[in-house]
Amino acid sequence: MERSRLISSMQDILGEEGVIHEHEQLRTYECDGLMEYRVIPDLVVLPESAEQVQNVVKLCYEEGIPFVARGSGTGLSGGALPVKSGLLIVMSRMKKVLEVDIPNRRVVVEPGVINVWVSQAVADEGYYYAPDPASQIVSSIGGNLSENSGGVHCLKYGFTTNHVMEVEVVLPDGSVAHLGGGKAPDAPGYDLLGAFVGAEGTLGIATKVVLNIARAPESVRTLLAGFDDTEGAGGAVSGIIGEGIVPAAIEMMDSLTMEAVEAAVHPGLPEDAGATLVIELDGPEAEVESQFERVLKICEDNGATELRVAEDDEERALFWKARKAAFGAMGRISNDYYVQDSVVPRTELSSVLHKINELSEHYGLRVANVFHAGDGNLHPLVLYDNAAEGEADKAHDLAGDIVMACLEAGGSLTGEHGIGLDKKKYMPKMFTDEDMETMQLLRCAFDPHQIANPGKIFPTPRLCGERPGPFKMHPLQKAGIVENF
Amino acid sequence: MDTKNVSIESLQNIVGEENVREARAEDAVEGVEPSFVVEPGSIEEISEVMKLAHEEGLAVAPRGGGTKTYLGNPPRELDLILSTVRMNEIIEYVPGDQIVRVQAGIKISDLQEKLGESSQMLAIDPPEDEATIGGVVATNASGPRRYSYGTVRDLIIGVRIVLSDGTIAKAGSKVVKNVAGYDLSKLFTGSLGTLGVIAEANFRLHPIRDVSRTVVAEIEGGPEEVYAAVSAVVRTQAEPTAIELRYDEDEKLVSVLVESIEGGIDAKVETISYVLGSHGEIRDPQDGDQLGVGLPDVEEDDALLKVSAPPADLAAVLDSVLGAAERRGLNHPKITGHAGTGVTFVGLSGGDVGAKDEVIDELREIWSRHGGSVVLLGATAELKEKAGVWGPPRDDMGLMGRVKDKFDNRGIMNPGRFVGGI
């Protein structure tokens, strides 16, 4: 289909203001939160209703036009990177909170709703939405569910997938289906909702989402604990978990991260510490108080140099601001950084951190570590200077070696940022060809023409209806429509 | 004896002579008799059996403890029972990581015993002790603890599966947090053996709480009062572990399981007792988990229904069940439920098949309008045939059919047993 005809067809569906086609405006959408990869989409459309999404997708299906859905574009794996000669469907205008149902503990939203709005909508009733990625003040529910976002509190409360109860989906052929039971549990049939959440936009576009909300805890206690080194902090983490305590969160920052955070946010982190833990307990008051005493003792037993308990909500918020600002604060100590998202079994944390130090020395690049210590989800930040020749490549190699060290320790490529474009080259290190072909059977059931976010997650797309065999070029690739397969 | 083109010898060649036998009457699934029972000892042997079945077009039913074979439509055809009983090992258990990897054939009770040695548990508590992990996953079995820990989908973190053509594949990992690749663990959860064989599964574990107590209230009144009591418990910040309902003609009990550490338990019990106290008589709190079995007792000719509805509609669910049964002249239904989650179990007795069918029909008509469902868990063949097991299909049925076709292109995995006849 000619571009001018495509533009006018899209304008028929969305109105003139719903279609962006000027080159300079399109450039705004050339990347997501991972800025190394940039592709200018052919067109950007901004639907306001499920019906508009459906009509857009129908047209894409009929014309064989690949599309990428995008929320706020905060993703860190290039998952919402546009495809060349493809359509970018930006969901940010669908941002209504449609229903708050306290007795059933459900909130129904459009996908462009910002994560933190959900908690705000129910706070007065004493409820909140548990998944809290660090990006929660800008990232959208649609993006969260595509990536199965985590957050600092998922150790106790689970991930996005545990809190999405139903999605209305526009499938890649333009039809609409509802996955999951919404307010009622255990919808008979396959758990297609479970497969859809975290599929990184490759199975369709969510147009309405039913979320689970949780009762706010009676009591919350938050602690900053400084240690001489990450070993001591790691020992405290193991001690807490080993005692059968399930904290709401345990986060670790190493000295390099603390330096950056201190400069950016001034939270008053323990001075001269080699590592700091942010530990939070929540629940019924008597239980929390009793467990909190034990946590303080465990920290002391593991050589804590400083313990600072948040005195009020304001101080608690400051502790979390420090942690959540960690990525952004890196600008204070380095021109550029590259973040990884690997996961290791918790008992391997100390040996993997040791390995990361060795790699850092070997490459001559600094690595800052800030991570979800409770569930072993590392966020090593490789610091480099893009202006220095060869340093960016070196940073990527170092990051790749860190990923491999995590896999060797029995871990995963990604805990919450997704595979996207960035990590698909590592997929064969974690999965066999059979594993990935089997996963793509699902893709073929949802999207036989593979027009929904093509080129993401899997290094080699499986052509639907064909027997697995030697690699063949995808028609989209042959036609030069899709790069980076 | 031969079935289709397969001899017992060809199966023996794969799994060994002593691990294949001709099927007996008790191996029948909802009246359909298979030819052989095969017991592979490894995932590779499962794969070889499946390759053979795929080539010859043999219909296969995976089986664990066989405690839920009553669930679902009768199979359209059945040649082999693929039993996982020999695959009962714990592959890896790291208490410090709170994860476990097991073979599908391990009994959940054996697993819990082992985990208990490290004061940990898999937070799934279906009523059947003899159930295997593979069966629990395939049927999405759950119990009272689902109120606070969720169901299998919330705890499973990885699987190894064998597809109908013998392909061995894994998804997920052994770490709690992982978003690499599609989450096939959830897809296979509750798939009733229709997509492939679950050979191994990985789970996240939870610590066993130090102390637990059960607070039981005898509710004075009917459905409205029962819901008021349950909703008062749900609204507290006491984080109850489970809220169970037993609703009989002469007794309406709401039982709440409370767990904590020594320093926290009394306050929780007090809160729960206080809010329940305005809705009925509180019995003395009992030590430990005294919730009892979650399903109503039913006789052979009775029907056992699972009604799923929005949790805040509990009173309406009870009213609809009681009203529908009474109007058709059935006995007072026996009702239990995981109150607070929207799951209610109903035992229907008395009346003929036609009357029960009408009750089911009426309940489906009401609850599908609210996004819910009514599944016929247990019933006579005649009633299953008449009422259907799963209820009317939803708008994702076409997609489910396509998923089934992709994973099981010859339609040999438990054909016909699941929703929409897939």
Image (cartoon, grey):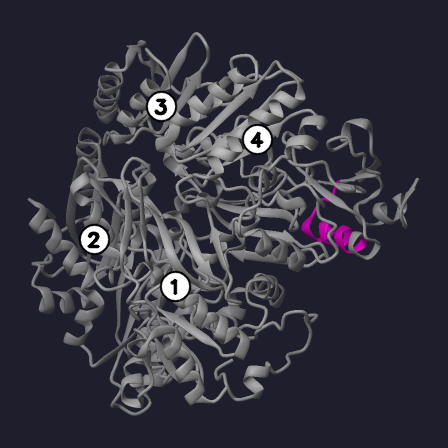
Q: In which quarter of the image is residue B208?
A: top left
Relative side of B169 to A114, left or right: right
Residue interval drawn in magenta: B39-52
Give me the C-alpha separation between circle 4 and circle 3. Answer: 34 Å
Name the residue furthest top: B250
Please check the rendered image and state whether residue B388 is part of the magenta-colored stretch, yes or no. no
Q: What residue type is labelled 3?
A: Leu
In the picture of the structure, the residue carrying the numbered disc 2 is A277
Task: Specify whether residue B142 is in view.
Answer: no
Q: Mark 4 lies on which chain?
A: B
Tell me what residue is drawn at x 61 percent, y 42 percent.
B104
How far from the left and from the top, in percent, is residue A430? Answer: 51, 65
**Marks 2 and 4 share the same chain:** no
Q: For the residues carrying marks 2 and 4, which lies nearer the camera in this image?
A: 4
In the picture of the structure, the residue carrying the numbered disc 4 is B361
In the picture of the structure, the residue carrying the numbered disc 3 is B257
What crowding class fits label 1: few (fewer than 14 Cα within 10 Å), some (14-19), or many (20 or more)? many
Q: Mark 2 lies on which chain?
A: A
Query: Which of disc 2 and disc 1 is earlier in sequence?
Result: 2
Q: Which chain carries label 3?
A: B
Q: In which quarter of the image is residue B28?
A: top right
Q: Is mark 1 on a helix, strand or loop?
A: loop
How far from the left and from the top, in percent, is residue B278? Answer: 23, 15
Task: Specify whether residue B356 is in view.
Answer: yes
Relative side of A241 to A173, left or right: left
Question: Relative to A445, does residue B141 appear above or below in the rendering?
Answer: above
Q: Which amino acid does label 2 sit on?
A: Leu
**Marks 1 and 4 share the same chain:** no
